[in-house]
Amino acid sequence: QVQLVESGGGLVQPGGSLNLSCVGSGKIFSINGMAWYRQAPGNQRELVAHITSGHSTNYADSVKGRFTISRDDAKKTVYLQMDSLKPEDTAVYYCNFAVYDIGWQYGVYWGQGTQVTVSS
């Protein structure tokens, strides 16, 4: 089994910053892509940012220049630094890992989500 646990969400004023973390645990052998998604009420879940095992990144147009994704494979952790936050960034944020476990089985895993609210 593989578990992902997010942290770092909360309430922040417009223009503020938050740094989300997601730690993987369990029978992980290697991690390919890592990503952050978000889902606002009434909306579909959307990709926010993705980072490959080679540290190539891509971002949703709505967050380019404001959000930065990074990873620490030794810690099995992905981060999302969010700056210049806007009210429209309000959502539940989910991390996502593409993993080979110790049995060399491939799977995609999700965290439980962390709430980010941007409001004055």
Image (cartoon, rainbow, N blue to C red):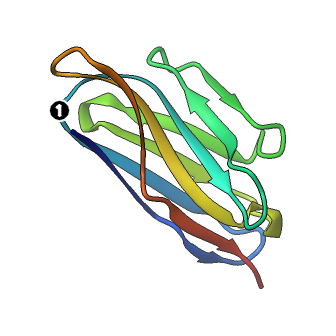
Q: Residue at x 75, y 60 (%)?
A: 84
Q: Residue tagged by mark 1?
A: 27
Q: Residue furthest bottom?
A: 120
Instruction: Locate the N terminus by quadrant.
Output: top left
Residue 28 placement (x, y as % from top left): 22, 29
In the rendered view, would you say 18 is above or below 107?
A: below
Is residue 27 or residue 58 the one in the foreground? 27
In the rendered view, would you say 71 is above or below 81?
A: above
In the rendered view, would you say 27 is above or below 87?
A: above
Residue 107 placement (x, y as % from top left): 37, 26
In the rendered view, would you say 23 is above or below 76?
A: below
Specify whether 35 is left or right of 102.
right
Q: Check disc 1 and give the amino acid type.
A: Lys
User: For residue 78, what is the image quadrant?
Assistant: top left
SS at circle 1: loop
Q: Residue at x 64, y 37 (%)?
A: 49
Specify whether 65 is left or right of 2.
right
Instruction: Locate the C terminus by quadrant.
Output: bottom right
User: For residue 69, what is the image quadrant?
Assistant: top right
Structural crowding at the residue carrying mark 1, measured as other residues with C-alpha within 10 Å and reported as few (<14), some (14–19) or many (≥20): some
Residue 46 placement (x, y as % from top left): 71, 44
Residue 34 placement (x, y as % from top left): 48, 32
Is residue 19 or residue 107 the one in the foreground? 107
Q: Residue at x 77, y 41 (%)?
A: 65
Q: Residue at x 57, y 50 (%)?
A: 81
Specify whether 61 is left or right of 28.
right
